Image: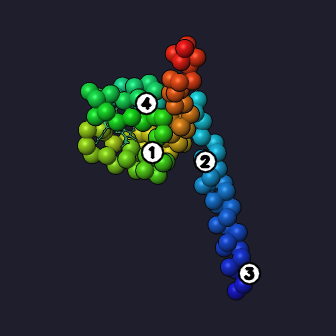
Amino acid sequence: MCCQIFRAAFAAFFVGVFFGSGSVLAASAENGKAAFLKYGCWQCHGTQGQGSVATSNGKVLAPDPLPYEAFSGFVRSTDGAMPPYSEKILPDEELTDIHAYLLSIPKAANYKSIPLISQ
Ligand code: HEC
């Protein structure tokens, strides 16, 4: 009995390591950038996820994208102005890559950090 519980806990732990966080660790911003272009996200959201009032209701995807759960939930099930992308069209690996790409986009520098402007 006791061993069974341990075995189950161990199995859950390893499944988590290999299939859970493992896929997140493998996410690549570089591949994500390519996928962002390939799946046409850029056409409405701009190549840097900056968005525009005309094409994405002013929604900005980066910097500071939504946490992955909310991000993928939206992409998979939106039924508003944005078309939903099912897993068949856009596999999870590529969606995590797209998210990694959006996370990698730096915030704009504070203008006060630019010496020429502070003179
Ligand atoms: C045809 C234009 C169009 C395309 C293509 C498109 N989007 Fe969107 N997206 C929108 C619009 C418009 C909204 C705002 C939707 C709303 O307010 O209901 C939006 C909203 C979002 C949001 C929600 C942001 C927030 O802060 O609420 C995410 C995330 C998102 N898009 C990701 C993507 C990704 C990833 C792709 C490519 C796989 C993509 N979109 C492709 C038009 C588009």
Which one is earlier in the sequence, the residue at label 4 or at label 1?
4
In percent of width and height, residue 111 lies at 50, 23
Q: Residues within 10 Å of mark 3 (few under 14, many from 20)?
A: few
Can you identify the residue that label 1 sits on? Answer: 66
Can you identify the residue that label 4 sits on? Answer: 49
Ligand 1 contact, mark 1 (Cβ < 8 Å): yes
Whether residue 17 is visible here, answered yes or no, is yes
Q: Residues within 10 Å of mark 1 (few under 14, many from 20)?
A: some
Alpha carbon separation for disc pair 3 and 2:
29 Å
Front residue (pair 25, 60) = 60
Local SS, label 2: helix
Which one is earlier in the sequence, the residue at label 3 or at label 2?
3
Ligand 1 contact, mark 4 (Cβ < 8 Å): no
Which quadrant: the N terminus? bottom right
In percent of width and height, residue 82 lies at 30, 38
By what rule are the colours in the image chosen?
A: rainbow
Q: Which residue reaches farthest bottom?
A: 1
Decide: marks 3, 2 in contact (CB < 8 A)? no
Q: Amino acid at mark 2?
A: Ser
Which one is earlier in the sequence, the residue at label 2 or at label 4?
2
Alpha carbon separation for disc pair 2 and 4:
23 Å
Alpha carbon separation for disc pair 3 and 1:
41 Å
Alpha carbon separation for disc pair 4 and 1:
12 Å
Seen at 71% across and 74% down, the residue is: 7
